[in-house]
Image (cartoon, grey):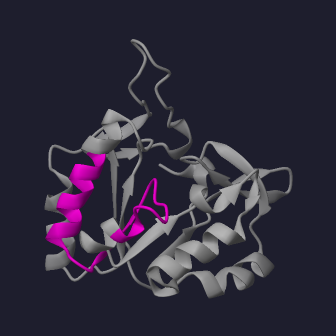
Amino acid sequence: MRFRPCIDIHNGKVKQIVGGSLKDGTGGSDSVSTASENFVSEHGADHFATLYKEHDLFGGHVILLNKAGTPEYEATKAEAFKALGAYRSGLSVGGGITTDNAREFLDAGAYAVIVTSYVFRDGIIDYERLDALRNTVGREHIILDLSCRRRDDAYYIVTDRWQKFTDTVLDASLLKKLEEYSCEYLIHAVDVEG
């Protein structure tokens, strides 16, 4: 067993949040993304990345928790780039990753990109997007985030920062099918995350 550290970044700060509590801003005076927070660090993401590098903790992930295209996302992305630069080829990164920006994150120092929402459309896996991403960066640089929530008697993959249920049940046959598209999986049981 290997320990995989994580650096979650929300509104430009390293935080440990309750996963299902993340809410996008609605505009106007309520425009900032919010979440229930367990911990907010006084240190930047590069501080933790340096610690992970010093202790040879390869394979941790940096997660951008803000929605792409928002001012908060840009602050969060800048913080993520600091971490990736501090531990080049030691961390993966996720949050708003698409075929258009995946290479940018790899060039910034990530060994792999983590994707979920981008490869889902209308609640099902969009294999055309998955193929395009694999063709862009290679299977060896893709981690599929298959984080899930329980509904009825099954676990369903959730997207959009763990807020939207897909129609896709996480089971052994799906994991087998997706092997050809990724080098590893990232799976959180979101209902108990944090």
Residue 79 in the image, given as x and y percentages of width and height: 22, 51
Q: Residue at x 57, y 66 (%)?
A: 187
Q: Quadrant of residue 178?
A: bottom right
Residue 120 in the image, given as x and y percentages of width and height: 67, 58
Residue 82 within the segment the image draws in magenta: yes
Q: Quadrant of residue 144?
A: bottom right
Q: Residue at x 43, y 16 (%)?
A: 30
In this orientation, does residue 5 appear?
no
State the extent of the magenta-drawn residues as a range: 76-103
- Which residue is at the front of the view, 135 or 158? 135
Residue 106 within the segment the image draws in magenta: no
Q: Is residue 84 above or below residue 8?
A: below
Q: Residue at x 46, y 26 (%)?
A: 25
Q: Residue at x 22, y 60 (%)?
A: 81
Q: Is residue 150 left or right of residue 71?
A: right
- Which residue is at the front of the view, 1 or 60? 60
Residue 128 in the image, given as x and y percentages of width and height: 68, 70
Q: Is residue 135 above or below residue 79?
A: below
Residue 177 in the image, given as x and y percentages of width and height: 74, 83
Task: Single out the residue that lies furthest toward the right.
Answer: 152
Tell how many labels. 0
Q: Quadrant of the N terminus?
A: bottom left
In this orientation, does residue 45 appear?
yes
